[in-house]
Image: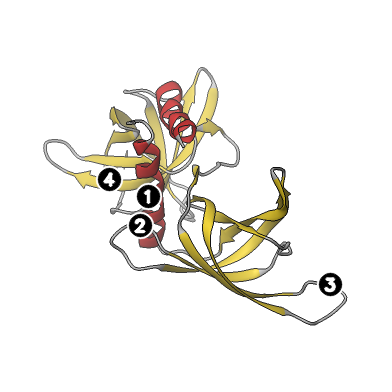
Amino acid sequence: MKNISHDFAEDVKTNISINELLQVQITDDPNPATYASRINDISEGKLVIAWPTNGGIRLLVHRDQILEFSFVREGTAYAFSGLVDETSLDPLPQITVILSSAIVRVQRRQNFRIKCLIPVEVIGSVRENPWDNTTTVLAIRTTTYDISASGIAIRYPKLIPEGTVLEIKLGLPDSGPPIKIPCRVVHSESLKDNQTQYRTGITYLALSESERARIVRYVYRTQLKGLHP
């Protein structure tokens, strides 16, 4: 766990700095407009940025919203995504952001993923033979192998075919209720250290802003704990 947390801290420490100029966009917004910002402070992996503006108009943001960020350093473009954790207008308009993905050269962003044991229920039906319409009902109670803002992985003694649609019920260790999420299997492969078990990767198909925010905050807090033995 500490190595994962260390990577999280190092990502911020080595790849971004105070006074870095940022361009900000709303995730999945068809409006291509970008808003300019600057990093005012960095604390425990959180970025405190000037409220993004475009032509003097502030970006409309709210807590728990996911935003896309980009910046250029020495001619190379970098990108990451982040969750709006807090907003403030006094003494200056600022937004506090929790990173939800690694800072990478412009390409497909990888969400921060941590190994953890969280209770999860998995329900669905599986066609074990592609030439047979017979299905097997899945009703699994287990724990996560790892989790991120985009999906989870579980260990299971059978291969679950790629593309299988499932519903998971995730019990985060916070004050909120369990989260029910429609999902799809993206891969299932045997574990090198245990050939009788498969690591099954599952991606979320639909997740509300508040649910994704809970997961991002859990990942962030778990990573942060690893920095303080």
| Residue tagged 4 | 58
Amino acid residing under circle 2:
Pro
Q: Where is residue 102 in the image (x, y as percent from the top left)?
A: 49, 36
Q: What's the CA distance linking mark 1 and mark 4?
A: 29 Å
Foreground pick, 223 / 197: 197
Amino acid residing under circle 4:
Arg
Mark 3 burial class by Cα count in 10 Å: few <14, some 14-19, many 20+: few
- Tag nearer the camera, 1 or 2: 2
Q: What's the CA distance linking mark 3 and mark 2?
A: 38 Å
| Residue tagged 2 | 173
Q: What's the CA distance linking mark 1 and mark 3?
A: 38 Å
Q: Earlier in the sequence, mark 1 or mark 3?
A: 3
Q: Can residue 55 be seen in this view?
A: no
Amino acid residing under circle 1:
Tyr
Q: Position of residue 130 (x, y in %)?
A: 84, 72
Q: Do the residues labelled 1 and 2 touch (CB within 8 Å)?
A: yes
Foreground pick, 191 / 70: 191
Q: Earlier in the sequence, mark 1 or mark 2?
A: 2
| Residue tagged 1 | 218
Q: What's the CA distance linking mark 4 and mark 3?
A: 53 Å
Q: What's the CA distance linking mark 2 and mark 4?
A: 35 Å
Q: What's the CA distance linking mark 1 and mark 2?
A: 8 Å
Q: Which of marks 1 and 4 is nearer the N terminus?
A: 4
Q: Residue at the spot x=88%, y=75% of the render?
A: 131
Side of 114 relative to 44 (left or right): right
